[in-house]
């Protein structure tokens, strides 16, 4: 009894005040994390899934290199495997964005100011934004309506931001890059539809 008088238990009010005080820093940290994540992406709505810093070149585009191309790729991998490859420092490859097949969800892996390693041609890497699309060139079922629409909106936003003409001279397939041995996005990619969508945004 004496001990209880000398060291009284804290009141319920004090306990609640303490809990609120303890929760505030956590709430603030979560808020700061959310703001930082939002600022990490260049395209609103994209999810930030960073590539390894060993897989791209840090830059200050467009002041260091002009951006005047968008290059369209097909992953030849699943969405999840593509993101894992970009995170692996031994792979030496990355693109700025990856678009998921089933719903058009977009991950940003490299900031637009940096040079992604996606084209297989340094000059084209320095001047382009690379967009990967989940799927395989010989499996057109991966090229869903959602993928086309969300990717086209992304490409349109990039073209607006960097004053890139919305045409096939400036929106290229990977196979069009000089020196490339790739065939993507392949014959099943509907370029007419894609360019029409880009221009309708």
Image (spheres, rainbow, N blue to C red):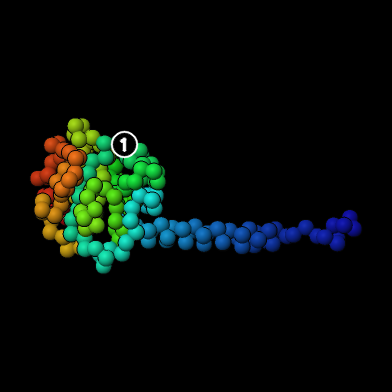
Helix, strand or loop at label 1? It is loop
Mark 1, residue position:
78
Where residue 88 appears, x then y in whole percent? 40, 44
Residue located at (26% from left, 67% from top): 63
Q: Is residue 4 left or right of residue 62?
A: right
Q: Nearer the viewer, residue 15 or 50?
A: 50
- To which quarter of the image does residue 159 belong? bottom left
Image quadrant containing the C terminus: bottom left
Q: Residue at x 10, y 51 (%)?
A: 168
Q: Is residue 67 visible?
A: yes
- Residue extending farthest to the bottom is 63
Query: Horizontal and vertical percent for residue 78?
Result: 31, 36
Between 145 and 41, which is closer to the camera in this rendering? 41
In the displayed structure, would residue 42 be above or below residue 146? below
Residue at image coords 27%, 63%: 61
Q: Relative to the observer, which residue lies in front, 186 or 199?
A: 186
Residue 111 is at least partly visible in this image: no
Position of residue 84 in the picture relative to residue 19 (left or right):
left
Tell me where residue 85 appears, x and y as whole percent.
36, 41
Q: Name the quadrant containing residue 81.
A: top left
How many marks are shown on the rendered structure?
1
Q: Residue at x 9, y 45 (%)?
A: 192
Residue 172: x %, y % from top left:
15, 49
Question: The N terminus appears in which quarter of the rendering?
Answer: bottom right
């Amino acid at each position: 009894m004496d001990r209880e008088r000398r060291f009284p238990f804290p009141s319920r009010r004090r306990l609640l005040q303490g809990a609120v005080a303890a929760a505030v820093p956590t709430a603030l940290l979560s808020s700061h994390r959310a703001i930082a994540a939002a600022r990490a992406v260049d395209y609103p709505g994209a999810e930030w899934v960073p590539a390894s810093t060993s897989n791209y070149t840090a830059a200050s585009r467009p002041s260091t290199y002009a951006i005047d191309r968008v290059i369209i790729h097909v992953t030849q991998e699943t969405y999840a495997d593509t993101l894992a490859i970009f995170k692996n420092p031994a792979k030496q490859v990355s693109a700025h964005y990856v678009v998921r097949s089933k719903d058009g969800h977009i991950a940003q892996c490299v900031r637009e100011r940096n040079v992604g390693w996606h084209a297989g041609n340094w000059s084209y890497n320095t001047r382009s934004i690379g967009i990967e699309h989940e799927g395989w060139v010989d499996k057109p079922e991966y090229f869903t309506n959602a993928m086309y629409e969300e990717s086209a909106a992304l490409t349109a936003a990039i073209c607006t931001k960097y004053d890139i003409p919305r045409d096939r001279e400036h929106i290229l397939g990977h196979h069009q890059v000089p020196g490339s041995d790739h065939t993507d996005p392949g014959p099943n990619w509907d370029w007419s539809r894609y360019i029409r969508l880009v221009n309708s945004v």
